[in-house]
């Protein structure tokens, strides 16, 4: 009797160990898949959220067109300032630890026109940070395609190079390493103004954000 119980115990132990082993293999497969997933093809749920536009260009409590005074009040004195002159337009780049802010000359002051972030010290466009899961980013704005390289769009990205298209152009596009949101203003043919394009470009690796860049009205 004791021998039969011992054999039964050994058999149950083997089954338990086999079950634990299978669970371990499944969990490892799920974990490793996050390192090799093609997020440019991952399935997304449809939603009715607003598309990306210039109002989403923010860093902490600052936004596009915040002044240099606002920047210093929010982040303090920059580590260094780089000055640039591009096509007759003056820019100042404020360099901080983990991020930099480009300000464009606007009459007698400078205002934010571009932000580059590589640290999780600051949040961008509401709640996006370095380290945020890329799936969360892709679901932030309207999703109209469940499984496509375009998260949403009214034109393909190539339309930006087509001079005959004067409509507002917008899209959200994803690749294996980036998620890009673009919104170009409608071109007013009777007014000589630049074609202002709002851009939000997010780099990611292993399913998490590594770098964030946004810009508007910049050469």
Image: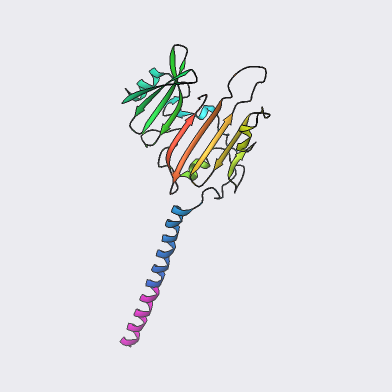
Give the magenta range: 1-15
- Residue 125 shows in this picture: no
**Image position of 135 (left or right of 93):** right
42 part of magenta stretch: no
In the image, is 168 to the left or to the right of 177?
right
Q: In which quarter of the image is residue 80?
A: top left
Taking depth in this image into account, of 178 and 31 the one nearest to the observer is 178
Q: Position of residue 7 (x, y in %)?
A: 35, 83
Of 155 and 160, the residue lying toward us: 160
Q: Which residue is drawn at 32% across and 87% down?
A: 3
Q: Where is residue 165 in the image (x, y as percent from the top left)?
A: 67, 30
Establish if 33 lies above or below 211.
below
Please name the residue shown 58% across and 31% down the image. 183
At 45% from the left edge and 58% from the top edge, which residue is drawn? Answer: 30
The majority secondary structure of the magenta stretch comes to helix
Q: In this view, does 106 lie to the left or right of 17?
A: right
Residue 159 rendering spot, x and y as whole percentages: 63, 34
Residue 106 x, y percent position in the rendering = 47, 15
Quarter holding residue 170: top right
Above or below: residue 118 compared with residue 89: below
């Amino acid at each position: 009797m004791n021998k039969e119980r011992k054999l039964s115990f050994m058999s149950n132990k083997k089954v338990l160990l086999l079950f634990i082993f299978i669970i371990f293999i499944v969990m490892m497969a799920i974990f490793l898949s996050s390192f090799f997933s093609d997020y440019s093809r991952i399935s997304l749920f449809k939603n009715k959220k607003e598309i990306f536009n210039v109002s989403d260009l923010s860093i902490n409590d600052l936004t596009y067109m915040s002044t240099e005074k606002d920047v210093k009040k929010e982040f303090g004195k920059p580590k260094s300032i780089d000055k640039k002159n591009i096509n007759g337009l003056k820019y100042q780049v404020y360099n901080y630890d983990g991020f930099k802010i480009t300000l464009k000359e606007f009459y007698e002051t400078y205002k934010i026109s571009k932000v580059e972030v590589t640290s999780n010290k600051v949040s961008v466009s509401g709640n996006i940070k370095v380290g945020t899961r890329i799936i969360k980013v892709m679901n932030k704005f309207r999703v109209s395609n469940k499984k496509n390289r375009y998260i949403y769009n009214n034109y393909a990205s190539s339309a930006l190079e087509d001079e005959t298209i004067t409509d507002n152009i917008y899209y959200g596009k994803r690749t294996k390493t980036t998620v890009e949101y673009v919104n170009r203003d409608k071109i007013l043919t009777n007014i000589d103004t630049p074609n202002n394009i709002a851009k939000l470009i997010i780099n990611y690796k292993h399913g998490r954000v590594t770098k964030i860049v946004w810009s508007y009205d910049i050469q």
